[in-house]
Image: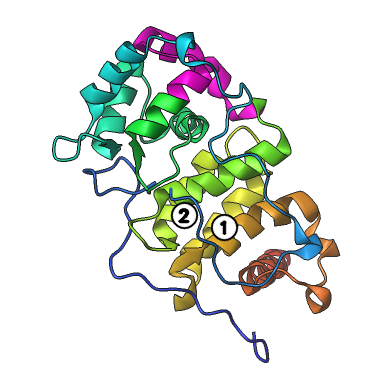
Amino acid sequence: MAGRKRKATESANQPNKMWGTSSSSSSYHHHGSTSGGARRRGGSSSSSRKEGGSSSGRASSSAIDEAAALKLFEDISDQEDPNVANMEGISTLCEQLGIDPLEDVRVLVLLWKMGAAKKPAEICKEEWMQGCNNLRVDSIDKFKALLPSLDVGFLDREDFKDFYKFCFQFNRQGTHKTLEKDLVIALLPICLSEGRVPSERLQSFCEFLETTKDESYSKITLDQWRSFLDFCYEVEDLATYDESSSAWPVLIDEYVEFMEKKAKDGKKK
């Protein structure tokens, strides 16, 4: 798009991997870092609820058997660092719960509700114990009983936006502030399941990312990630999109141009 200044996308030294697809180096969230990119139309803000915050609030320490909850954590904790459970341990927990660590969005919802926010792709002992108290779980059976409530359909819009941000942060690798484009394409259908956005919008945006030759989109920033969801909420009809007054990231402008060209090409056939 000539004449428009493009925001530089931060590069990373090593590529990200889809969470749960390999060893503990796989990625998934880290609380905090914001990224560059154009501001959103209307200045939409994230939820003030603490990331991973459960609506149940803080429970008293007597609400659960803390020794049993600690034993669960020890069973999945890393051998080299017993104070954390990485993706290998989280995958083990998923096996115990009978859910797919690669495709089931409830894994992410559970980690968000437990407050896994200190580092990407892991949950520390402190977060685990606080999360168990908040959710009142101290056994695999109680975790299994919790699964139906982890459906994203139960989240209101503001809580979902907070969860959606978590999905980006948890999947980052180390101190990197961006996600690889291929990881974003894989994550979006998982995070935006249950009809959160129109399926055609989701599919076409992933198609745009897959086909674009623009190297600046080889890595996606948090601002770009969050802006796509806000854009889906605020612009239902692409025909009403006015690029001249747009305050969305350039990525969104170019997605709309992609869709306009696709529509014109379709009419020619």
Q: In front: 48, or 243?
A: 48
* Above/below status of 259 relative to 85: below
Q: How many marks?
A: 2
Residue occupying image coordinates x 44% and y 14%: 137
Report the amino acid beneath label 1: Trp
Give the labeled residue for mark 1.
225
Position of residue 81 measured from the top left corner of the image (x, y, whole percent): 19, 39
According to the picture, the residue beneath numbered tag 2 turns out to be: 184
Tell me the quadrant of the picture where the C terminus can be found.
bottom right
The picture places residue 250, in percent across and down from the top left corner, at: 64, 74
137 sits to left or right of 227: left
Mark 2 falls on what kind of element? helix
Residue 152 position within the rendered picture, expressed as x and y whole percent measured from the top left: 60, 30
Q: Is residue 103 visible?
A: yes
Magenta stretch holds residue 143: yes
**Which quadrant holds the N terminus?**
bottom right
Q: Residue furthest left?
A: 80
